[in-house]
Amino acid sequence: TVGDAVPASQRGSWSSFLKSIASFSGDLSSLTAPPFILSPVSLTEFPAYWCERPDLFAAIADAKEGEQRHLAVLKWFVSTLKDQYTSRNEEMGSEKKPLNPVLGELFYAAWPDKNGRGKTTLLVEQVSHHPPITAYVIENKAKGLKLVGHNAQKTTFSAGAIIVKQLGHAVLTINGTDNFLITLPRLRIDGLWYGSPYIELVDSSYIVGGGHSSVIEYKGKGYFSGKSHSFKATVSPLPGMGGNSIVPPTKSAQSSGGGWLGGWSGSGSKNASSSSLSGSKELVVEGTWHEASTWSSGPESGKKFHDVTPTTGANKEEAVPVGGADGGEMGEFETRKLWQEVAKGIREGDFDTASKEKSRIENDQRQRRKDEQAAGTAWPLKHFKHEDVDTLYEQLGRPVKLTPPTDDRYEFLGNYPAALQA
Ligand code: CLR
């Protein structure tokens, strides 16, 4: 029957919610859902998932430019998927409906410096309300790493599941010049009927940079290994690049003796004549993204690639929120301050207070938009500048024929609040 996981008193409203999504496509965030499925966390906090394994992020800067760095980016990226797409199920029992950010909502947070990996900072701004668009920058200055991206969603309903197409992309820049384009997977939200939604990743996403491209294909139960959350990443040298001569050799790489790409660190490369892991061939990694994966081709075949299992995997660390307003206090648009009472109501089961507070925030927003319209002004973005075309997306995406062939961009203005400086 409908909603085995739904409290008896909310079954009626759960089935009307399901009916409303079935006849709806576009922006799900605006639909009213029953209390049991509400999350006390706003979507502006989600970009933190990109860096919950800060050591893997920092390791990208330490990897040698070219193939090895591409593989470090791939490893970090795959290791973010568990946090991005299964953490709510683990922490709250199922996927939930996040709070819908208001225009100008902010989230500032950081991961402290540990073992010389450097401090990593996170700055998020809701840059559009209709449709919801979230822009973010994650930076580790000590390591020269900067990830800038934005995301939005287009949702449709198909065969009882919600299909979420992610719009937007991210660009990771190392030392200001070495760029990696990262595109985002498509989501299928299943388990709706029973009231216990969970995400399966579908289709594919790309990483392009360091003279290589990776296509990451996602499959659920019944494909590849037949397991949920399966993926297969295929890494190839970019066409016309002849394998390992993509970027000019650096001094240190030239002197390493193994060609400028060097050998695969610590592996004692089985193929002595090849200076890189791949030569000019493809490399394949397979596994489950919420657990671990192994190389299924190339000289490392059979060896572990990524691991995020709690016992043996890379450590997970949640970002520590910091106040951006004067004195380290949170300002009224900082997500945890803005939603404080709503979140408290949801957590404590006081849904009257939660919905009253939510209405107060939404009415305030409506009033602001009216006033702006009357004054002929627009809400100014605080940290980003919108541009219609991202030339890096176009350039890096061309060899893998990305669709769409172009995308817009939110340029970070570099204006960190005091709490995130230095
Ligand atoms: C946002 C960007 C993050 C990854 C991510 C994870 C979960 C997604 C979320 C994104 C967008 C909003 C989302 C959510 C899961 C459920 C929620 C699609 C892509 C929708 C709006 C709520 C559906 C309601 C049912 C769960 C009841 O990097």
Image: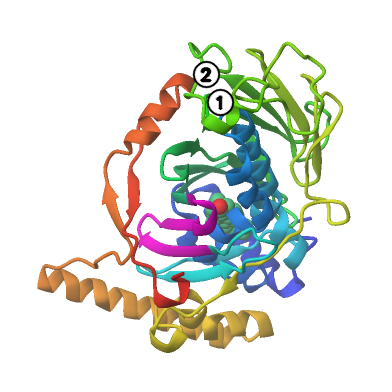
- In the rendered image, the quadrant that contains the N terminus is bottom right
Q: Earlier in the sequence, mark 2 or mark 1?
A: 1
Asked if 127 appears above or below 350 in the picture, the reply is above
**Range of magenta residues:** 121-146
Q: Which mark is residue 182?
A: none
Label 2 sits on what residue type? Leu
| Front position in the image: 278 or 37 | 278
| Front position in the image: 69 or 122 | 69
Q: Quadrant of ligand 1?
A: bottom right
Label 2 neighbourhood size at 10 Å, few (<14), some (14-19), many (20+)?
A: many
Image spot of residue 92 (x, y percent) = 73, 67
Asked if 74 appears above or below 39 in the picture, the reply is above
Image spot of residue 187 (x, y percent) = 60, 43
**Figure quadrant of residue 278:** top right
Residue 258: say if magenta.
Answer: no
Provide the secondary structure element on which disc 1 rests: strand
Verify CB contact (< 8 Å) between mark 2 and mark 1: yes
**Residue at image coords 61%, 56%:** 51
Label 1 sits on what residue type? Ser
Q: Is residue 187 left or right of residue 337?
A: right
Q: Which residue is mark 1?
A: 213
Image spot of residue 48 (x, y percent) = 57, 61
In this orientation, does residue 394 appear? Answer: yes
**Residue at image coords 37%, 35%:** 392
Q: Which residue is mark 2?
A: 238
In this orientation, does residue 203 appear? Answer: no
